[in-house]
């Protein structure tokens, strides 16, 4: 329980750092660290498959994409005059929200989670490949749509 | 079993709610398009945490994990398309400030 709480605090701390960091590169690295923390939380909750996907895709692939994009547009970041006070006041607003939410956490959880007995455990492989194989088809379609969209963004004017 | 798992579920949902708040706050206060994507990422992490926590409490972790995997795949496609749009917009306008995107022509 203590390890779980520590990992959740780590996840929140890196999440906050990614919002509050002035440098976008630091924000991207914090986001990757938050992904690693979430991976550890998922492993601790006996969800290794989701953890492996989170680690490889979110902490790996998305970080590479994000840092590549930051390296393209980084110069411009300094010219956006944003009020930094708004970002630095996030912990205060978060604390107020947290205290308000904690009061409603128990009734909300009881209202949302039906009091039914736990079902029979079915492993991820059986669920994904047999019970919800349609999800895989949907994932494939989303991949193709994303690839086509990115291709459309960077299409050469002469080839259009 | 459900009663035993509920305190853990409160805790996980509490942290998921804090992450949701941080993500929405980031999207509301920033004009930088890349920070908007950071906000979307935080929302996604909160959703994955809440999903797996609920699956663990209900004793159906296999289904929760399979939906989490689907969500991660969707997340990576959304982020990739979003970053592609940012790069394209940057090349077009020379800025990632969303206030500069008020000169769009139909």
Image (cartoon, rainbow, N blue to C red):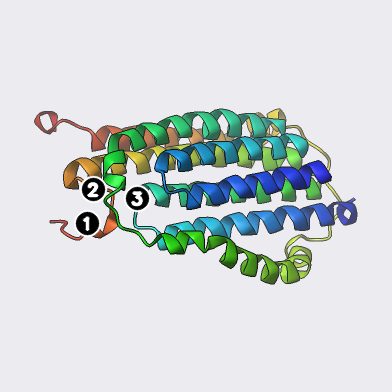
Chain name for mark 1: B
Q: CB of mark 3 within 8 Å of CB of mark 1?
A: no
Where in the figure is residue B25, as x and y percent of width and height? 49, 61
Horizontally, residue A98 falls left or right of residue A140, namely right
Residue B95 is marked as 2
Mark 1 neighbour class, 10 Å CA radius: few under 14, some 14 to 19, many 20 or more: few
Label 3 residue SS: helix
Q: CB of mark 1 within 8 Å of CB of mark 2?
A: yes
Work out whether disc 3 and disc 1 sit on a shared chain: yes
Where in the figure is residue B88, as x and y percent of width and height? 24, 40
Residue B41 is marked as none
Mark 3 neighbour class, 10 Å CA radius: few under 14, some 14 to 19, many 20 or more: many
Label 2 residue SS: loop
Residue B18: name its quadrant.
bottom right
Measure the C-alpha gap from mark 1 to mark 2. Answer: 7 Å
Horizontally, residue A6 falls left or right of residue A75, namely right
Q: Residue at x 89, y 53 (%)?
A: B4
The residue under label 1 is B100
Q: Is residue B106 above or below residue B38?
A: below
Give the farthest residue toward the left.
A158
Q: The C terminus of chain A appears in which quarter of the rendering? A: top left
Compare residues A52 and A65 and report the one nearer the observer.
A65
Q: Is residue B16 above or below residue A60?
A: below
């Amino acid at each position: 329980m203590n390890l779980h709480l520590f990992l959740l605090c780590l996840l929140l701390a890196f999440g906050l750092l990614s919002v509050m960091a002035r440098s976008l590169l630091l924000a991207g690295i914090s986001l990757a660290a938050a992904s690693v923390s979430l991976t550890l939380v998922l492993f601790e909750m006996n969800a290794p498959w989701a953890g492996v996907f989170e680690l490889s895709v979110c902490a790996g692939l998305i970080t590479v994409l994000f840092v590549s994009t930051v390296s393209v547009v980084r110069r411009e970041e300094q010219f956006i005059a944003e009020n930094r006070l708004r970002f630095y006041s996030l912990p205060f607003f978060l604390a107020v929200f947290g205290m308000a939410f904690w009061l409603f956490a128990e009734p909300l959880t009881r209202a949302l989670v039906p009091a039914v007995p736990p079902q029979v455990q079915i492993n991820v492989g059986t669920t994904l490949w047999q019970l919800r194989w349609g999800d895989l088809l949907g994932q494939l379609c989303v991949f193709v749509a994303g690839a086509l969209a990115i291709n459309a963004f960077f299409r050469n004017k002469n080839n259009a | 079993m459900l009663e035993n798992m509920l305190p853990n579920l409160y805790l996980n949902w509490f942290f998921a709610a804090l992450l949701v708040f941080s993500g929405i706050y980031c999207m509301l206060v920033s004009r930088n398009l890349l920070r908007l994507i950071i906000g979307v990422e935080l929302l996604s992490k909160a959703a994955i945490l809440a999903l797996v926590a609920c699956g663990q409490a209900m004793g159906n972790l296999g289904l929760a994990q399979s939906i989490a995997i689907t969500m991660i795949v969707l997340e990576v496609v959304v982020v990739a398309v979003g970053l592609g749009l940012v790069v394209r917009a940057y090349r077009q306008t020379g800025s990632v400030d969303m206030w500069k995107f008020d000169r769009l022509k139909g």
